[in-house]
Image (cartoon, coloured by chain):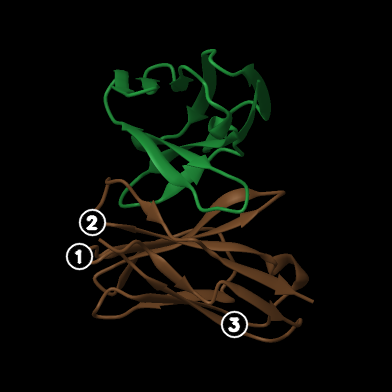
């Protein structure tokens, strides 16, 4: 079957680093996405990993290990505006079918 | 470039009615996917259209249907509404397969 797990909630301090983990199980895998979603808003794209390794984009980095079915999103120099839900999703099989995790609600405190 | 637009933004219906939601993708994007987001189930894939053809479908009952027009705009329809259909319906557009999907602001449907 298909399964994707991530922690429900995390808290962190402004200026710190936080790592949000995501594990998945699927027979057909075509890449892993991370989205950010602020309350009441649409998800916005953060990263897309197809190959193993680390992709860095400013304060955000994403890592993928296909053999372990594991990804993480690393947020550096946390800001209050980073308080949001972070959604992990993999592309299942063909085309554009995204299977989402339940999301990790991150609260950044001063 | 204008983003993905969805209309209406808010909708209130009663059980048994039917509803049609609209999505206009980013100019040049031919793929439109629809998702349902609820607090209990999170984001769930409904279906995806590319060049007017449904290429993929999620595990939703036949009451949920959709279509795509030649200009890539897409509509989804829900017939015989149930209370459990209350949700945020999001559409996402993409230029092609395996590419970044850009989400619209969503339509908040409330079924009374």
Give the label, 1 or 3, closer to the camera: 1
Q: Nearer the viewer, residue A73 or B36?
A: A73
Residue most toward the top? A16
Q: Which mark is residue B28?
A: 1
Q: Tell me, what hue is chain B?
A: brown
Counting every numbered tag in the picture gives 3
The answer to whether residue A89 shows anywhere in this view is yes
Q: Nearer the viewer, residue A38 or B19?
A: A38
Residue A93, placed above or below residue A50: below
- Residue B83: x and y in percent read 77, 71
Q: Which mark is residue B70?
A: none
| N-terminal-most mark, 1 or 2 | 1
Residue at the disc numbered 3? B19
- Whether label 1 touches label 2, CB < 8 Å: yes
Identify the subunit bearing mark 2. Answer: B
Q: Dot 2: few (<14), some (14–19), or many (≥20) neighbours within 10 Å?
A: some
Q: Nearer the viewer, residue A106 or A15?
A: A15
- Residue A54: image quadrant is top left
Residue B98, placed above or below residue B28: above
What secondary structure is found at the residue carrying circle 3?
strand
């Amino acid at each position: 079957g298909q399964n994707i797990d991530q922690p429900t909630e995390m808290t962190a301090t402004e200026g710190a680093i936080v790592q949000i983990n995501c594990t998945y199980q699927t027979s057909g895998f075509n890449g892993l996405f991370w989205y950010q979603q602020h309350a009441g808003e649409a998800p916005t794209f953060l990263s897309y990993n197809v190959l193993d390794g680390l992709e860095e984009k400013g304060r955000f980095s994403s890592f993928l290990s296909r053999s372990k079915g594991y990804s993480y999103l690393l947020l550096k120099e946390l800001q209050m505006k980073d308080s949001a839900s972070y959604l992990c999703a993999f592309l299942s099989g063909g085309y554009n079918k995204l299977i989402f995790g339940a999301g990790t609600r991150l609260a950044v405190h001063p | 470039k204008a983003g993905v637009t969805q209309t209406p933004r808010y909708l209130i219906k009663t059980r048994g009615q039917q509803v049609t939601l609209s999505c206009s993708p980013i100019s040049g994007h031919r793929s439109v996917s629809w998702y349902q987001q609820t607090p209990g189930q999170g984001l769930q894939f409904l279906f995806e259209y590319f060049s007017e053809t449904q290429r993929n479908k999620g595990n939703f009952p036949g009451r949920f249907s959709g279509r795509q027009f030649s200009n890539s705009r897409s509509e989804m329809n829900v017939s015989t509404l149930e209370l459990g259909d209350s949700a945020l319906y999001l559409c996402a557009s993409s230029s092609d397969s395996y590419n970044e999907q850009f989400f619209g602001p969503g339509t908040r449907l409330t079924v009374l």
